[in-house]
Amino acid sequence: MAEVIYDHVTKRFDSVVAVNDLTLEVKDGEFLVLVGPSGCGKTTALRCLAGLEEVTSGDILIGDRVVTHIPPKDRDIAMVFQNYALYPHMTVYDNMAFGLKLRKVPKQEIDRRVKEAAEILGIQDLLNRKPRQLSGGQRQRVALGRAIVREPQVFLMDEPLSNLDAKLRVQTRGELIKLQRRLGVTTIYVTHDQVEAMTMGHRIAVMNQGVLQQLDTPENLYDRPANLFVATFIGSPAMNIFPAKVVSGDGSYRLVAGEVTLEVPPSHRSRLADYVDREVLLGIRPEDLEVVVGSEAQRGDTVRLPVELIEPLGAETLVHLRGPAGTLIAQGEPRIHLNPGDVVTVRVRTEHLHTFDPQTEMAIF
């Protein structure tokens, strides 16, 4: 096991900067997730670490070794790809053993490692089958097994679950988390799925346009996003964002957007001192906008908004509302009965408000 360090790493493809001055430290034994939209540079960053792409500038360290110019085979890493990349003519056993045979590992040691990995992954009864005889989930386990038998310092995983159906993806996700905890190997996992990132990573590195936006725990990314991109990328449904004016008077601060006026909690007021009589971007997550009925509607900060659309999801109902600057998504009770055009009371959890500078898009609070 080893820590991994990206030291001001940049990767260019002609005039395109795929990774821009990436500085990142992955702790020994950590499960770190690189997440972002397509084209954000996350896979390129992983391929630079694997040695599959040549770094334009900067250095990459694995443990105490600078591996920037070391061939992939000498970096002591194992990679699991989006496609399983199994040899169709080989059995599961031979697929898992192939890399060890190339390294001339003794036959007895190969047998021990393959059978041990197969038992960990629950595929010990599949060792004599060919890939065509396996399901997608079983093939992915074989690909993981091939990486495990290497006993590397670092696991690299490039969207390994994206070819699985939704149910199997959730199941395999849980198995991967338990596997990483059991092995304790430093793991860097690439995905575009923010739900996958939030549920799997000890920490998450959010990237956009080749630039690291924020590196933090899932909880901090969700509760304290560093900028507007992270705020809207992390969380599903996405955070509601709309412009609001900061108004001060009588020792209080208010955020005013059309007919909506919200009191700013005392703990956040000092951060808005430089924005009085100016516009900021106000962010509210759907779960902090609660559609309420009856006596509950009289408690807390509330606003009245018309309903545009209802999305019943079983455990909850998403209510699309006509807000001051477009549609807002709020959360309702599972079996709430509403119709488009109804005007409803929405309670706002103002302690969970977010604000962003409209020019820099950086978080104010």
Image: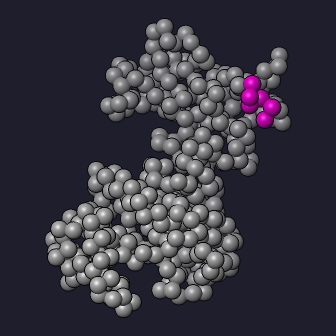
**Residue 165 quadrant:** bottom left
In the picture, measured across the screen, residue 126 lies left or right of residue 61, that is: left
Residue 240 sits above or below residue 265 on the image = below
> Is residue 30 visible to us here?
yes
Span shown in magenta = 266-271
In the picture, measured across the screen, residue 98 lies left or right of residue 39, that is: left
| Residue 274: in magenta span | no
Work out which quarter of the rendered image holds the C terminus and state it. top right
Task: Identify the residue shown where x is 61% and y is 18%.
Answer: 301
Coordinates of residue 101 in the picture (x, y in percent): 33, 88
**Residue 251 quadrant:** top right
Residue lying farthest to the top in this orientation: 295
Task: Identify the residue shown where x is 20% and y is 74%.
Answer: 127
> Is residue 45 visible to us here?
no
**Residue 61 quadrant:** bottom right
Q: Nearer the viewer, residue 210 or 48?
A: 48
Residue 122 sits above or below residue 53 on the image = above
Q: Nearer the viewer, residue 134 or 53?
A: 134
Q: Main secondary structure of the magenta part?
A: helix
Coordinates of residue 182 in the picture (x, y in percent): 41, 60
Query: How many numbered discs, if any?
Result: 0
Q: Nearer the viewer, residue 83 or 174?
A: 174
Task: Identify the residue shown where x is 42% and y is 64%.
Answer: 183
Coordinates of residue 201 in the picture (x, y in percent): 50, 54
